[in-house]
Amino acid sequence: MTRSFSSTTKIPNTGVALPRAHRAYSTGGSASSGGGSGFGTFALVGLAAAAGGAYYFQDDLKKAFGGAPAAPPKPLDYQEVYNAIADLLDNADYDDGSYGPVLVRLAWHASGTYDKNSKTGGSNGATMRFDPEASHGANAGLAVARKLLEPIKAKFPQISYSDLWTLAGVVAIQEMGGPVIPWRPGRADAETAAACTPDGRLPDAAKGQDHIRDIFYRMGFNDQEIVALAGAHALGRCHTDRSGFEGPWTRSPITFSNDYFKNLLQERWTERKWSGPKQFADKTGDLMMLPADIAFIKDRSFYKYVTTYAKDSDAFFKDFSAAFGKLLELGVPFPEDAKVYNFKPSA
């Protein structure tokens, strides 16, 4: 027994005719045999109608009842995403009044796992969503940043986490007074933890220049780029419940500047006497530097770039923009026609 459409019913005042079903008995082929009548024929016709005519049928109904055809999805406006992230930054109850520094750290740590030899790691994948990478010691405290961005992901579901996290770093730098960072979308999220990188790919702040070079050369950076990236320590502070270290590098930890380099050269740094890990303090005890920071003024090659950036803020901003943009793109297979964005900071 099958259904066949032998007549139609008109919807009053519309001119639209709908098929009316009648029961009909058939001894023809079954659904599996593909006979000329019966359920198999009805199913094929129904599938064809669903695939080829559903849109037009619904469109006719919408017109008949005064509705408009469904609009195509709106392209993602990345400036709008930028602005939405910028609106989240200020918070008087968090650290020094801004989430900016922790968003820079999220973008940095999501990208800094890249290995140029194995072509693994980097921002593509947003693998910090999964354990064990989310629980790596270097990523302690970054759940704050990931959670902060969830409402943005919900509002703009088209954007990948990989693009969202790196864009958030760009927003934070620019909104805290830093240089424009060229950015482009096109990263794809990993589906499982199988894509996570092993622990130990990010810098260890307790170590010196040899370790620093091992980490950054593995990513493809040179000495000048390494020092430029280190200038991000103008932002934020260390927390004992995250890294074990404590304190800010500068007196304006939510303003991007070359103060990190000035402080390295102008302050007298002595080892802090406390129960925590080895770090250094200025004469007031308000500021701190880590062993990896002190390495930049002990190493001759690093030192020359520290002095350059301490004297010339414009040179630092220019070089940081290039190095940070490079960091965010390590290992990402962008389409050839991927658009590069230079975002306008919010008012």
Image (cartoon, rainbow, N blue to C red):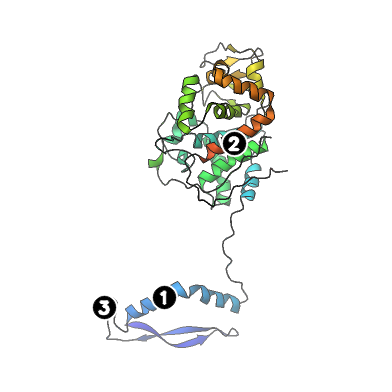
Image position of 129 with respect to 45: above or below: above
User: Of all residues shown, which one is farthest toward the bottom?
Assistant: 7
Please give the label number shown on residue 33.
3
Q: Can residue 343 be seen from the camera position used here?
A: yes
- Badge 2 amino acid: Ala
- Badge 3 amino acid: Ser
Q: Residues within 10 Å of mark 2 (few under 14, many from 20)?
A: some
Q: Can residue 206 be seen from the camera position used here?
A: no
* Residue 36 or residue 268, whichever sits in front: 268
- Badge 1 amino acid: Ala
Q: Residues within 10 Å of mark 3 (few under 14, many from 20)?
A: few
Question: What is the C-alpha distance between the residues marked 1 and 2?
Answer: 54 Å
In terms of sequence position, does the residue under pointer 1 or pointer 2 come before the other? 1
The quarter in which the N terminus is drawn is bottom left
Image position of 21 with respect to 137: above or below: below
* Residue 10 or residue 197, whichever sits in front: 197
User: Of all residues shown, which one is farthest toward the right?
Assistant: 347
The quarter in which the C terminus is drawn is top right
Please give the label number shown on residue 322.
2
Q: Which residue is mark 1?
A: 48
